[in-house]
Structures are given as structure tokens and as C-alpha cells.
Amino acid sequence: MRLWLVTFFGAGRSPVAPGTVGSLATAALLFALHFALPAPLAFNILLIAGMIAAGAAAVALGPFAIAHFGRKDPGPFVLDEVAGVCLTMLCLPVIGGCRELWVVATAFVAFRIFDVWKPPPCHHLETLPAGWGILMDDLMAAVYANILSQLVTRFALHMG
């Protein structure tokens, strides 16, 4: 059960780019859930709840994953990506009553860029112990990604 959870229902088990696959699975799930919760406030509450739940699970299960996979920040462990995508999508614009696919795609791409690049202080945050180090660098990358996504989507809406 723990492996199923830390790999986000198997997404992190991808042999190629498990972090990207975990992020994509999260973005796809959130895009689908948006239609069940079309009100922006309800969706943003879902994003906050998802970030908190994935973050708490990442911290709690981080030591297990490190021991199981034998690495400090194991690739198959993607709960940090789940929390990061939730934070990246927080408060992005809703167009015509829905969060369009291009907005979700913008958030996904921005998060992957910053999660891979890890600008300061992301690398420093990785030094935190166990699950905290796994989680916090992704949340910092998500802050950068959210800012970029806000700028890109709002500029595109203003120009469109």
C-alpha cells in the first residue's frame, strides 16, 4: 500500500522520467476534477487540500521510500510532484467558467522546468532531512512555476 501511495498509484514506476509522469498524472487528474468542481473557490480548496495531503504523506513516508529505494530523493517517489503541481495550479485563471487545457499545460510545463532546473534555494532545501528535503525543493520550484504560470496565462488572456 505504501509503495502504491508514494508512486502516486504507480505513475512513479515509469521507467522513463518518473517525476514527469507523476506530474502529468497529477495535472490530468486535476484537469478532470476541475469539471466536478467548476467553482474557482472549490477547486482552489481542492488544490490546497491536495498539496497538504501529498505534502504530509511525503514527509511521513519519505524515510520509508529512502530506505526502500536506497536513494535520498528516489525517482519513483512522486508525492512531492503531486504537491508541487497542486501549488503550481493554485489560483490560475478560469476562462469562461472552466480552467482550459492550455492553462493546465502551462502549469505542468512551468513546474517541470523549475523542478528540473532547481534554482536557488531549491538545492539548499534538498538538504533538509528525509521527507522534508524531498518535498520542500519541489514546493519552492512550484512557487516559481506558479509565478511564471500566472504571468504567462494572464498575459495571454490580456492579449487574447
Image (cartoon, rainbow, N blue to C red):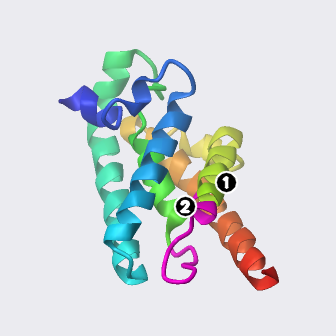
Q: Residue under circle 1?
A: 110
Task: Identify the residue at image location x=49%, y=69%.
Answer: 90
Q: From this viewpoint, is residue 47 visible?
A: no
Q: Nearer the viewer, residue 159 or 26?
A: 159
Q: Residue under circle 2?
A: 88
| Callout 2: SS | helix
| Callout 1: SS | helix
74 relative to 99, above or below: above
Tell me the quarter of the picture where residue 148 sits: bottom right
Horizontally, is 22 left or right of 104 in the view?
A: left
Task: Please check the rendered image and state whether residue 97 is part of the magenta-colored stretch, yes or no.
Answer: yes
Task: Identify the residue at image location x=77%, y=84%.
Answer: 158
Q: Which residues are magenta?
A: 91-104
Residue 79 pos. (x, y %): 39, 42
Residue 24 pos. (x, y %): 51, 44
Q: Nearer the viewer, residue 142 or 133?
A: 142
The answer to whether marks 1 and 2 mark residues whose Cβ atoms lie closer than 8 Å is yes
Residue 140 pos. (x, y %): 57, 55
Tell me the quarter of the picture where residue 37 sits: bottom left
Q: Nearer the viewer, residue 116 or 156?
A: 156
